[in-house]
Image: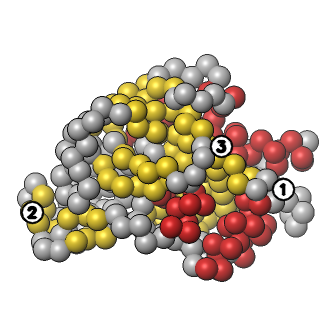
Amino acid sequence: MAKFRRPQVELIVGGENHDMNRVRLALLGMLGQYPLLRIRCAADYGDGFALGETDFLITYTNNVFPDERSLAALRDFLDRGGRWLAIHGAAALTQFKPPAVDIGGIILPGLTDTPDLRPDFMDLLGVRFVSHLTQQSYRIVRGPDAHPILDGFIPFEVVDEPYILELRAPCDVLLEARYTGHAPGYVEGPWLVDNSRPQLIRRNHGGGEVMYLAPGHACGPYDLRPFIQEIPDQPGPWLTDAYIDLLNRLIRWGLETSLEEES
């Protein structure tokens, strides 16, 4: 904030197989409720320089990771008290495992694998994506841990990819869901044990905090090229009022400290 006397937000939206345009515009609309903010948009972590001037980081990515220099900047950002909201595929590293397969008429180079190739990043985030069930409707409810952002929270239904996650650090599970089923197209699965599945987690790192929100899938008609030319639009939860309300709560959390300092 010192450089511009305004809270600085770094919005990183980029990667594969998701409707990045829809998500970027939606998040910018929510951030636009705060005219004091200065928002920088990027498609990746770059060289990490911007994080040195950032108060609040939002990432919606898939297969986008910081290099060694920008990972160090991300650690420094959290150490000095920054807040980081990571959404959906921000915890995902995926690659195809040959041979080619036919998944519902879509020919893929192989099953989708999620090898643990970036433990440094996943440990910092506190969670790693492992697999997901077929996109479906499921109910999100309070988890075992409390937080002020959930004051007045009402459980709600979303249409999304039910994520299977591996927790990598001590954290609070603020929201959860229950689901079982197969994971077509993924190496890991099926998931037939009726466990509680984390949907929103919070963890501390240094003087900062991280929130990770699992639901958030969106896929536009052309986002699966070159594997399929066109699909029906999949807005996921981005047209669900309760989900947007949750994101607005998380944005207020992310800005809380910097806006208080400015007032």
Which residue is label 2 attached to? Answer: 102
Amino acid of disc 2: Asp
Q: Going from the N terminus, do you reach mark 2 or mark 3 first?
A: 2
Q: Using residue 139 as the reference point, say whether residue 189 is left or right of it.
A: left
Which residue is label 3 attached to? Answer: 251
Q: Are marks 3 and 1 in contact (CB under 8 Å)?
A: no
Query: Is residue 193 placed above or below 141 in the rendered structure?
Result: below
Q: Using residue 176 as the reference point, say whether residue 4 is left or right of it.
A: right
Q: Quadrant of residue 115?
A: bottom left
Q: How busy is the neighbourhood of tag 2: few (under 14 within 10 Å), some, or many (20 plus)?
A: few
For the residue labelled by badge 1, is the local secondary structure a helix, a strand or a loop?
loop
Q: How busy is the neighbourhood of tag 3: few (under 14 within 10 Å), some, or many (20 plus)?
A: many
Q: Residue at x 63, y 72 (%)?
A: 71
Which residue is label 1 attached to? Answer: 6
Q: Going from the N terminus, do you reach mark 3 or mark 1 first?
A: 1
Between residue 12 and residue 179, name the one nearer to us. Answer: 179
Q: Using residue 155 as the reference point, say whether residue 31 is left or right of it.
A: right
Per the model, the C-alpha gap separating discs 3 and 1 is: 16 Å
